Amino acid sequence: MEILHLSAREIVGVIADGEITVVQVAEALIEQESRWAHINALVNFDAEQFLNAANIADREFVNGEVGRLHGLPFVVKDNIDEVKFSTTAATPALKDHLPTTQGPVIETLLGAGAIVMGKANMHE
């Protein structure tokens, strides 16, 4: 199974069926990010933090704690607050802005079991 070719629906399905783990998905995406880091698509990416979130999701799966999007990784546009990363909206004036609350869309996705991979670059 080529993880990078799966749709979001397929990823959720194969995780739910126990065919792959969230960590396997995260590792494939970390490798892909490493290959493409030079294009600067992600402005905030912490592989260790992402892998830790995947490990937690796998433990939750074993304990039966799953949401509809359990283990689905997603990238947040850099104008949406996510407390683990700065929110800069690609402007130098906000380079040190660390939000104290999650954006509502982030809360919804996390509540459904999805995990944050990082923040996507954008035009100022």
Image (tube, rainbow, N blue to C red):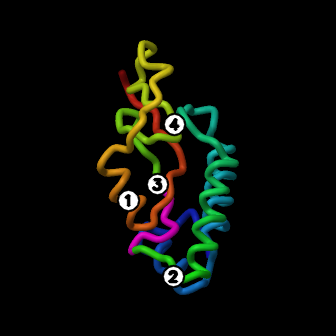
Q: Which residue is mark 1?
A: 109
Local crowd size for mark 4, using a 10 Å CA cut-off: few (<14), some (14–19), many (≥20)? some
Q: Which residue is mark 2?
A: 16
Instruction: Name the front one of labels 3 and 1.
Output: 1
Q: Which residues are magenta?
A: 68-73
The tag earlier along the polypeptide, 2 or 1, is 2
Question: Callout 1, which amino acid?
Answer: Leu
SS at badge 3: strand
Labels 2 and 3 touching (C-beta < 8 A)? no
108 up-or-down from 44: above or below: below
Q: Which quadrant would the C terminus be assigned to in this image?
A: top left
The x and y percentages for residue 18 are 59, 84
Question: Callout 2, which amino acid?
Answer: Ala
The tag earlier along the polypeptide, 3 or 1, is 3
The x and y percentages for residue 43 are 53, 32
Labels 2 and 1 touching (C-beta < 8 A)? no
Q: Which residue is mark 4?
A: 85
SS at badge 2: helix
- Outermost residue on the top side: it is 93
Name the quadrant containing residue 35. top right
The tag earlier along the polypeptide, 1 or 4, is 4
Q: Which residue is mark 3?
A: 74
Residue at (57, 63) in percent of width and height = 4
Question: Callout 3, which amino acid?
Answer: Phe
